Amino acid sequence: MPTIWVDADATPKAVREIICKAAIRTEMTTRFVANHRVPVTPHPCITSHQVEPGFDVADNYIAQEAVAGDLLITQDIPLAAEVMENKVDVINNRGETYNPQTIRQKLQMRDFMETLRSSGVQSGGPAAFSDKDKQTFANSLDRWLARAKRAST
């Protein structure tokens, strides 16, 4: 049975709640990883792992532990690209499912925006997390869970 990994450092509370409800409903092992304490619903299939403080410590832990067939929920594009090389599925907090083509585009856009910011261009941040984002995420997670259930039977 696959594991759901959550890069929990910047996961909105609404997304954490959706993940916990789905984990309990499906009894899917779910691991929240962050460099700070992350409150999660108490349940035997859900764990919250606090790593040491430091740059990319949580990301490195997830990258080492996630295996083919698992799911990672993250906003971190480089982490997503890294785990996808090991056949780990990735969904972001807004419900976008990454594939090899989209992750390449996201990496290029991220690098481009970083270049703009380093040259002094103000680009603003992402739009506020909305109810539509929450619903899109829930739908994406449900589709993945259904595929995982079919694959395990």
Image (spheres, rainbow, N blue to C red):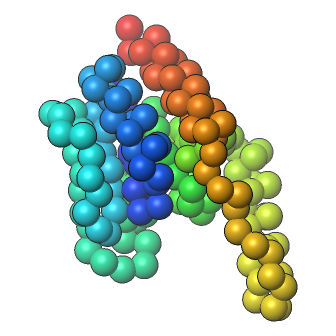
Quarter assignment of residue 58: bottom left
Q: Nearer the viewer, residue 126 or 110?
A: 126
Which image quarter is the N terminus in? top left
Q: Is residue 97 visible?
A: no
Report whether 106 appears left or right of 93. Answer: right
Which image quarter is the C terminus in? top left
Report whether 9 appears left or right of 112. Answer: left
What residue sits 42% from the left and 35% below the top? Answer: 18
Instruction: Give the total of numbered labels.
Output: 0
Q: Position of residue 12 (x, y in %)?
A: 47, 52
Q: Position of residue 47 (x, y in %)?
A: 22, 45
Q: Position of residue 147 (x, y in %)?
A: 51, 18
Q: Is residue 25 above or below residue 10?
A: above
Report whether 52 appears left or right of 63. Answer: left
Q: Position of residue 135 (x, y in %)?
A: 59, 31
What residue sits 47% from the left and 61% below the top? Answer: 10
Report whether 105 appears left or right of 8. Answer: right
Q: Is residue 51 above or below residue 151?
A: below
Q: Is residue 18 visible?
A: yes
Quarter assignment of residue 61: bottom left
Question: Going by the picture, which residue comes out furthest to the top?
Answer: 153
What residue sits 58% from the left and 26% below the top? Answer: 139
Q: Nearer the viewer, residue 108 or 19?
A: 19
What residue sits 45% from the left and 44% below the top? Answer: 14
Q: Is residue 65 above or below residue 112?
A: above
